[in-house]
Amino acid sequence: MRYFLELSYNGTPYHGWQRQPNAISVQEVVESSLSTLLRSKIEIMGAGRTDTGVHAKQIMAHFDYNENLEMSQLEYKLNAILPADISITKVSYMHEDAHARFDAISRSYEYHITLVKDPFSIHKAYFFKKSLDINVMNEAAKLLLNYTNFKCFSKSKTDVKTYNCTITNAVWEYNDNRLVFKISANRFLRNMVRAIVGTLLEIGMNKLTIDGLIAVIKSEDRGQAGYSVPAHGLYLTAVKYPKTIYIDGRKER
């Protein structure tokens, strides 16, 4: 039987989602907790692989177990033994071939920037001191929807079959000295969001023009794009699936 976990975590203490040979990861902690509760070796597959220090407000993972589970009880017990920085929001029973990674049809991220020194935003938002033209940054962000090849924003030497992604939303929102970049797409390349944000910040500082951004995208050269902003400001906020993978036929999440 296949089960989905919906969870969230503060990524500060972890070396990303994926299990590492010599460092602690979110996947390892959740697998260890599940294995303890179910008294069986449990392996989970996540919807994505967040990097060291990146947070998740919502991420999905699946695991297989041969017995019927009382899902509300499993959720309660898992939260009781998991550390405070990892939370299980929901456990769902899925179709046998449902896949947390490959069945996802949309993923959304946010990047948080604080424009003032804020001790309560340490490890949660990127402190950026320089003034920015948010209007031109939004003009540039909207332009991203016109393209699909984002090799210029992908981490070098990434082993992928295609650099094509369909971005459906990209916008900057400003409120009370907090700047948040929101972006959604069918898939993301490794380091893509952080590279996009770094490039848009250069536009906001008038170091790069809109035409310059177009040239960067067309170059397919990571060296032409802006710097990669720090990981601690990045949040995976939502992963959506088609209703067909849910046993109860619920709508897209």
Image (tube, rainbow, N blue to C red):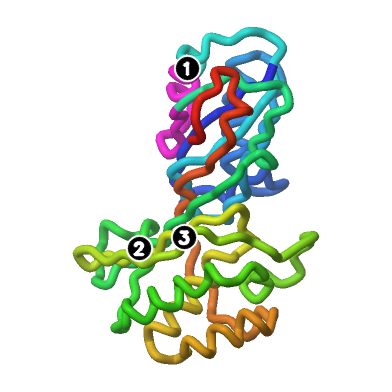
Q: Percent x, y for residue 143?
A: 49, 75
What secondary structure is found at the residue carrying circle 2? strand
Badge 2 vs badge 3, beta-carbon distance below 8 Å? no
The residue depicted at 68 percent of the width and 29 percent of the height is 98
> Mark 3 highlights which residue?
169
User: Looking at the picture, does residue 241 appear above or below residue 39?
Assistant: below
Image-quadrant location for residue 149:
bottom right
Of the numbered discs in the image, which one, if any, rests on residue 219? none
> Mark 2 highlights which residue?
180
Question: Label 1 amino acid?
Answer: Lys
Q: Percent x, y for residue 84?
A: 40, 34
Q: Is residue 79 left or right of residue 49?
A: left
Badge 2: residue crowd in 10 Å (few <14, some 14–19, many ≥20): many
Badge 1: residue crowd in 10 Å (few <14, some 14–19, many ≥20): some
How many labels were placed on the picture?
3
The residue depicted at 56 percent of the width and 56 percent of the height is 185
The residue depicted at 80 percent of the width and 60 percent of the height is 161
Q: How far apart, in angstroms, are the residues tagged by discs 3 and 1?
A: 37 Å
- What span is colored magenta in the figure? 75-89
User: Looking at the picture, does residue 181 appear above or below residue 84?
Assistant: below
Q: How far apart, in angstroms, are the residues tagged by discs 2 and 3?
A: 13 Å
Which is more N-terminal, label 1 or label 2?
Answer: 1
Q: Nearer the viewer, residue 14 or 220?
A: 220
> Mark 1 highlights which residue?
77
